[in-house]
Amino acid sequence: MAEIGRIQPKVDQITSEPSIFPVEPPLGMYTVQMDEKGRTKLPVDFQTFFGAFPEKKLYVTSLDGITGQIYPISIWRRNQRLFARSTQNTKAVERVMFNAQDLGSEAEMDSSGRITFCQALREELKLAGQPLRLVVVKGHVEILSEQVYQARRRAARPAEGEEITEEKPRPQTENVRVLEEMGLL
């Protein structure tokens, strides 16, 4: 039983481990649009999630050149420390870090809850002029273009008469999968 007045660490509901988040992340997938200036207005649940972190900076990037990611800056710094001390899969680390730096930039939410994506990221992922899907995955927000969303949707659902099995899982980008096994959030 907790003592009155004593702060208890937030516990992850799924793993029963201390959470790295100051509030519960949004659940489900949200659809957003990017305006002509490369800004995306985040849904209120995401504004609340990012706004609860002590530092308001975000890091917006892509690790694989296919999907985008929005990291609270504290989570991104954790990942940078992971990269720096990594002695395994150094080629995967180098490739992912190159993509992250090449396509990434720091951002902050404005008073309307919008964040600006850098031009390199918008162009590489072809984000303009289409619905974008946002979903929290392992400590960051994934940004899916319509093409990536539809491909994942098809892969997640069996074709008529087909079943998804452990022998035939949904494909992932190998370099990112390797880093996730190492602890990438």
Image (tube, rainbow, N blue to C red):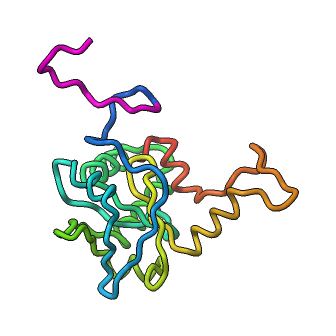
Where residue 25 appears, as percent x and y from the top left, is: 36, 47
Find out whether residue 137 is within the magenta segment: no
Compared to 54, does 60 lie above or below? below
Q: Position of residue 92 (x, y in %)?
A: 50, 56
Task: Please name whichever residue, 184 or 27, is drawn nearer the observer in this view of the structure.
Answer: 27
Q: Quadrant of the N terminus?
A: top left
**Image-based side of 146 in relation to 151, left or right:** left
Range covered by the magenta-colored residues: 1-14
Identify which residue, 52 or 72, lies in the foreground.
52
Q: Is residue 122 left or right of residue 167?
A: left
Q: Residue at x 38, y 65 (%)?
A: 100
Residue at image location 48% in from the left, 76% down from the top: 131
**Residue 170, how many percent across, how many down?**
68, 54
Instruction: State how many labels appear.
Output: 0
Above or below, comparing residue 46 to residue 185 in the picture:
below
View extreme (right): residue: 161
Residue at 24%, 67% in the rendered image: 113
User: Which residue in the rendered view is the most extreme toward the bottom?
Assistant: 36
Tell me which corner region of the image, top left, top right, bottom left or bottom right, holds residue 69: bottom left
Q: Residue at x 47, y 72 (%)?
A: 132
Q: Quadrant of residue 37?
A: bottom left
